[in-house]
Structures are given as C-alpha cells and as structure tokens.
Amino acid sequence: MTKMSKVFQHSLRVIYGDTDMMGVVYYANYLRYFEAARTEVLREQGLSYVDFEKSGHAMPVAEANVRYHASATYDDLLHVETRIDKIGGSSIVLSYRISRDSDKVELCTGMTRHACVDQSGKVVKWPHWFKEKLNGS
Amino acid sequence: MTKMSKVFQHSLRVIYGDTDMMGVVYYANYLRYFEAARTEVLREQGLSYVDFEKSGHAMPVAEANVRYHASATYDDLLHVETRIDKIGGSSIVLSYRISRDSDKVELCTGMTRHACVDQSGKVVKWPHWFKEKLNGS
Amino acid sequence: MTKMSKVFQHSLRVIYGDTDMMGVVYYANYLRYFEAARTEVLREQGLSYVDFEKSGHAMPVAEANVRYHASATYDDLLHVETRIDKIGGSSIVLSYRISRDSDKVELCTGMTRHACVDQSGKVVKWPHWFKEKLNGS
Amino acid sequence: MTKMSKVFQHSLRVIYGDTDMMGVVYYANYLRYFEAARTEVLREQGLSYVDFEKSGHAMPVAEANVRYHASATYDDLLHVETRIDKIGGSSIVLSYRISRDSDKVELCTGMTRHACVDQSGKVVKWPHWFKEKLNGS
C-alpha cells in the first residue's frame, strides 16, 4: 500500500443541466465531476483509461461517498482537487475536494474506491505498468 | 414503407434530478423520456431491444426533434404517446407526444429517426423477424 | 430520535441513457434511483415533497454513500427498498438497497442524510405536521 | 431580424458518464453540449445568462433539433461551433456543429430556438441592452 500526497487539479464550469429546481447542482452530479477529475489524474500520470480498458481491465467503482457542505450553482467555475489516498494490490482509493473559484468556499468532499477487474469482472492485480505509473515512478 | 396508426402509451414520474433551476424539466431529459417510451413500444410488439443487439444489430438515432409547448415539473406524472410513423428498409421514424396526467396539457411533441446498423456500424436492412413484429404481424 | 423498521418498495426500469460504455448503469445514476424511491417514501406516509417546499422548507442532501456490489444493466427491472433509519430534530437518515427483479441479486446499498432547512438555507427543526407523518402517526 | 456570421468556439471533454452501452455518447447529451456552448456565446458577447435571469427574463428552449452523423466516445475532445442564425423580436435561433479534435470528423449538427419570456412565462421582447450586445454592437 502506498500513500501519495500529490494533489491533482481539475476545473469545470457548471451548466444549467447540472442544476435542479432548488437552484443548485443536483447531488448526483458531483459524482460526474469526481469522474472527470479522475480521468485527468490518470492523464497527468501518463496513463489513459482508454488504454487501460484496451488492455482488458476496468476499474469499476466499489464505493462512493460525498459530504455536501455548500451549494454550487449555474455558471460557477469549480475546482476539483483529487488525491490518491491508497493504492492496494487490486484497489485504489481516491479523495476529492470541490471548491468554487470565485469565493474559494469548499462545496463538498468525497471519496471513491475502485477495484481492478478483468473482462470477466473478476478482481485481479493491477497490471505492473499501470501501478508503476500511478505511483509516479 | 409502412404507415401504422397504433398509439403506444407509457407513463413516468418526473424526479427532482430531471429538473433544472428554472423549476422545470431540463430540455435534454425529454429525449430520455422518448427513449423509455421507445423501449416499451418494442416490448408491446413482442420485441426486446436487448435481443436485437444480441443479434448483432443496433438502431442508433440519426435525428431527433423536440418542440416544447409547456413545462413539466417535479413529481408530475407524464404520459408519453408514441407512434411508429414510418418503417423503411433500414430506418424507422417514431413520433412522440408528452402530456401531463393532472391537467392533460400537451407538454411537447417530437420525433426520432433511427437507422438499422450491424456491429461494424454499417447501415443494413432490418432483420426479417424484427420488421415483421414491428409491423405487428 | 426514532427508529423505524418499515420497508418502502419502489420499482423502476433501467433505460439506455442510464448505462455507460462498460455496459452497466453509471455509478452516479444510483443516486437518482435513491431520490425516486425517497419521494415515494414520503408519498406513502401521506407527505408530498412539493408541499414541503411550498411550506418554505427543503431537505438538501448532507451526505450520500453507495456501496456497489453487482451491476445493473439496460432494461433491468430494479427494486429499491428504503428504510427511514433515523429522524432527528432537524435531520433524517435513509438507507437503500437495490436488487434486480429477475435474479434477486443485491446490486447496491447506500444511505443519504438530509438536513431540514428554511428558505434562507438555515438548518431548522422539522415542521410538526411533517415529522408526525414521517413517524407514521 | 438580424443575420450574424460570427462562429463561436467551445471545447469540451467527453466523460464516461456521457456514454452509453453502445460505447458512444448518449444522444440526449449533445443537448447538454449545445447548452454549454450557448452560455459561452453569451459570455463572449459580454452577456451573462445569470444576469439575464436576474433582470426577470428567461430564454426557454422552444425547439431543438439534432442530426447525428458520427459517434463521439469517452475522452474525445470535442469542438462545438455555434452560430446565431436569427435574432427576432422575442426569439433567437442558434445552430451548432460538433466535431472531434483528433480527426476533425463532424459528429452532429443541430439547432435550438428560444423565446424570451418574463417571470410569468409570457413571451416578451428582448430587453434592449440584451439585444444590442447579442448583435455585437
């Protein structure tokens, strides 16, 4: 198990379709924002999730958690900070923190835990090349 | 080309996540409602889209149109009426009309045009068994 | 604080738009299913979330958690079992369990915690009439 | 009525949640992409849709059309070109063209027509300041 402290940054703009009639971002959409940020984490480590899938693997979400502290609304520019909390033999835990650009208010924090699976859906060890790059080596 | 007059009925409940900050259903979500209704049309004709895909075919949307007349909002019970407008050799045109249960107001009308394609994405003729059932024979 | 054991049932059909390229329901969409089930819990207790909002209140999500055990796919008929785990002075915790109709496999479990707020977003006590009905009295 | 030839550019990255089990972007999501591009058109003309709503107006979609030519998939970088086709007294028509960055393939074209309404939902003339800026003057 490896502890990494690097913080990955991703920015995105809230569209009208992300909001609900309370006038704020619908709670499920933060999981979409987490996913967008996750892809960029891989890219910054020189990894492509597309290539990972082509190698016969996938990393489905095993658990997701979100704590909502304040509301984002339409046209807000958001920053998602992502950390790789733990890389296990066949799992990974990422944590997220979303804040608003204009006033720096923390909107939500959360985590996702993923398993590494093969095409049959069986949990398998991370491919060596994938784990190496994830570890930033 | 075949003209059919049968009207298929599908009902659904608007969830909070379907609305936007204008307090009404976000315009893209009506295409989701059309899709749900489409699946039920096939089912009522004894067809399963899952089986259709297993036979190596797909019917991607080639065109979609929606005219918005009035707004649906959270918790509205909606009725989607679907008609098969045209069945061509390798295409199908469906039309939709969505109304609200409580006051019968017409909320939107629309259409989708689909092509029959094989697994390589090439446009092909409808499988015989599929077209027969679509035609209700 | 009150512990309730009643289980509320809600059924829904997975549409194509709920799936992702892994061929299964996208992880964020389970939070939409939870929400649909939640509305029905209120309705079965004689409550309407629309009326609750009209009374000047809202119950935004303060925390959400999902554990994904198996995958739902297109056209699956799903059952959502919802329980009211805790009703506090100004909060409520609901738990969910989603299973597939065809094989009864448990797909995911989860929870949402909500706060009762007024129109300014301030946390306030549940209206008396609301809490009474929630408690089933 | 005014004809404008300026082309507005907006780029976006397809996330996993935008795809469906056909492995491509779900057809309704292109309307989300149109909306994101639309907001940027306003911003580039010195307009903010947030301010427009604060002035007691909204511009709901009266009609939307999409023609799907080729498929976008996960992680594709897309370009949305938007044109203001017509500005009427109380309506606007925008057209869109989405292409993929990597191979410049045209994926879809479409249009949306909007009405200018006041807070009661009544169709009204565009506010003078809004129309002037839209016209780029």
Image (spheres, coloured by chain):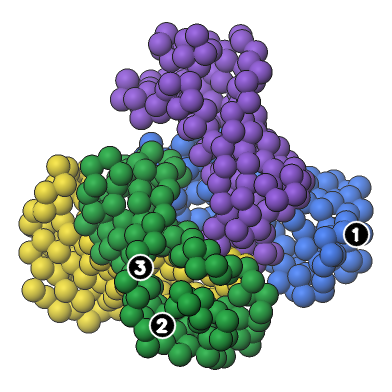
Chain colours: A purple, B yellow, C blue, D green
The number of numbered discs placed on residues in the rendered structure image is: 3
The answer to whether any part of residue B104 appears in the image is: no
The residue drawn where x is 88% and y is 69% is: C129
Q: Which residue is mark 1?
A: C124
| Whole-number angstrom distance, CA of label 3 to CA of label 2 | 13 Å
The residue type indicated by label 2 comes to: Ile
Taking the view exactly as shown, the residue that stands out farthest to the front is D137
* Residue B73, horizontal then vertical, whole percent: 58, 74
| Whole-number angstrom distance, CA of label 2 to CA of label 1 | 47 Å
Q: Is residue D132 left or right of residue B121?
A: right
Placement of D103 over or under B88, stated as above or below: above
Q: Are marks 3 and 1 on the same chain?
A: no
The residue drawn where x is 64% and y is 71% is: D51
In the figure, residue B116 lies in which quadrant? bottom left
Quadrant housing the C terminus of chain C: bottom right
State if disc 1 and disc 2 touch (CB < 8 Å).
no
* Residue D15, horizontal then vertical, whole percent: 44, 42
* Residue D116, horizontal then vertical, whole percent: 52, 83
Q: Which residue is mark 3?
A: D6
Q: Which residue is mark 2?
A: D87
Q: Could you say whether the residue bearing mark 1 is in a helix, strand or loop?
A: loop
